[in-house]
Amino acid sequence: MNVTRGFTGRPRVQNSGLPPGQYDAGDDWPVLSAEVTPDLTPGEWTFRVDGLVEEPRTWNWDEAHALPGSVYAGDIHCVTSWSKFGVRFGGVSLDAFLSVVRPHASATHAVAYSHTGYTTNLPLADLTGGRAWIAWEYDGQPLAPEHGGPARLLVPHLYFWKSAKWIAGLRILDHDEPGFWEQNGYHARGNPWEEQRYSGD
Amino acid sequence: MTETFTPPTRFAVPGRIAVSNQTAAVWQSATITEIRRETPHASTVRLAVPAWAGHLPGQHLMLRLTAEDGYAAQRHYSIASAPDDSGHIELTLDHVEGGEVSGWFHTVARPGDRVEVRGPVSGFFAWPGDRPALLIGAGSGVVPLMSMVRHHRAHGLDVPLRLLVSARSPQELIYAREYGAETTPVFTRSAPEGVPVGRMAAAHVAPLLAEQPNGGWEAYVCGSNGFAEHASRLLVEAGQPVDRIRIERFG
């Protein structure tokens, strides 16, 4: 351990709920995206699931909202080291979309992509079983454009760069294929509790 | 079936810069050799990092401080210095109100202290000096852009480079004495005699986009999220293609 002279840090809280290396951002919700925020209205938004599935399908705003609603209430964690407690997103569980398209037995991974062209890869197991959402509400309000509105992917148990903003679709694959940040040196999976920040962690 | 997924726009084409995954994964000890005040709220820290693998202008690193009880705090910082073979790198840090890491740098740190760094990380915002670069920054958002300006200068590059930098006042303008003809400062609260005061506007961006260099500009925007939204919108409205705008937001 390399102790830094005179550094004490913030007062520590036992069982703070913070993954290692994270701090509590409190009421702040920093915005991190590498591209220009798109002008995308709900009327223009679509979400497609294709690749290794029985029935590829594209949903528009109204069709997606006709699926059973689902809420995530919990915490989110960004690789740049902030975490945010007690957030509440509304949308639809990804399971509801996947049960319609029916992934093949050979399917193992997905690439999520945005209307901007941003991509990120995920094991299919991280997107199923009630662990991932298409979210369009935050705290009861429409999701703001800079936070990915009108709709974003939400995979709160992984670092937040996996929760692609302005989600446009999922391509289901039988192999892992690095996305935008993963090609820029970030970890393939990004589990905050194991501090999977960079490739090699 | 094996296929390679291609996204629907060109934004997500792989980074032009290959990033070494080895260097990103290893924490290295760095020794503070100098601390220079830049403005009332920003200081530059010079670090000796003997095993530093080198970086490209615009890249950042992760920095870690460790307390005696093992508690560690880590933050991303842009690298301010141009790549060189001195075995040193420089960071310029704002003193963030209540910031546990920047607070340590501004009130405790002195030459000889050791911290840990890993990196460089991320090639997306990097500029190796190969394309005309239009740089727009505000506050400490100018830090990675200054690495590019210094690189351009150190190598006497011919490729066009312009910097638009916004600060509240001349006193708050980081690196004020280093700017040359490539730079236009914009002051939002107070300005020298004869210089207008106001927010960065279309009138600042338009002349730069009018002098369209061969191959077009690669635009790099860095600052707070509010500034990044504003500046990237100005660029799009002035005709800059969205997939030629790279943004680093300070979250």
Image (cartoon, coloured by chain):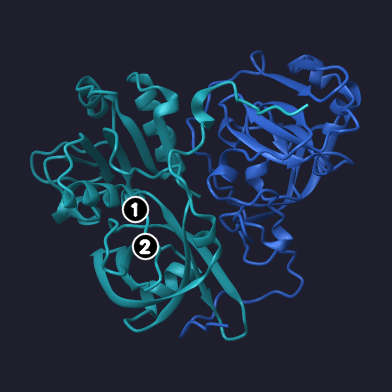
Chain colours: A blue, B cyan
**Are the residues tagged 2 and 1 within 8 Å (C-beta)?**
yes
Quadrant of residue B183 within the rendered picture: top left
The chain letter under disc 2 is B
Tell me what residue is drawn at x 40 percent, y 51 percent. Answer: B59
Relative height, residue A135 to residue A3 (above, below): above
Tell me what residue is drawn at x 45 percent, y 46 percent. Answer: B123
Quarter holding the N terminus of chain B is top right
Residue toward you, B106 or B27 = B27
Inspect this view and state whether residue A142 appears.
no
Circle 1 sits on which residue?
B140
Whether marks 2 and 1 lie on the same chain? yes
Circle 2 sits on which residue?
B93
The amino acid type of the residue labelled 1 equals: Ser
Inspect this view and state whether residue A21 appears.
yes
Q: Position of residue B54 (x, y in %)?
A: 37, 60
Q: Position of residue A168 (x, y in %)?
A: 67, 24
Quick one: label 2 or label 1, which is nearer the N terminus?
2
The chain letter under disc 1 is B
Q: Residue furthest left?
A: B194
Tell me what residue is drawn at x 39 percent, y 73 percent. Answer: B105
Tell me what residue is drawn at x 70 percent, y 33 percent. Answer: A111
Quadrant of residue A72 within the rendered picture: top right
Q: Residue furthest front?
A: B1
**A9 left or right of B237 in image:** right
**B177 left or right of B200 in image:** left
Q: Position of residue B139 (x, y in %)?
A: 32, 50
Relative height, residue A121 to residue B238 (above, below): below
The amino acid type of the residue labelled 2 equals: Leu
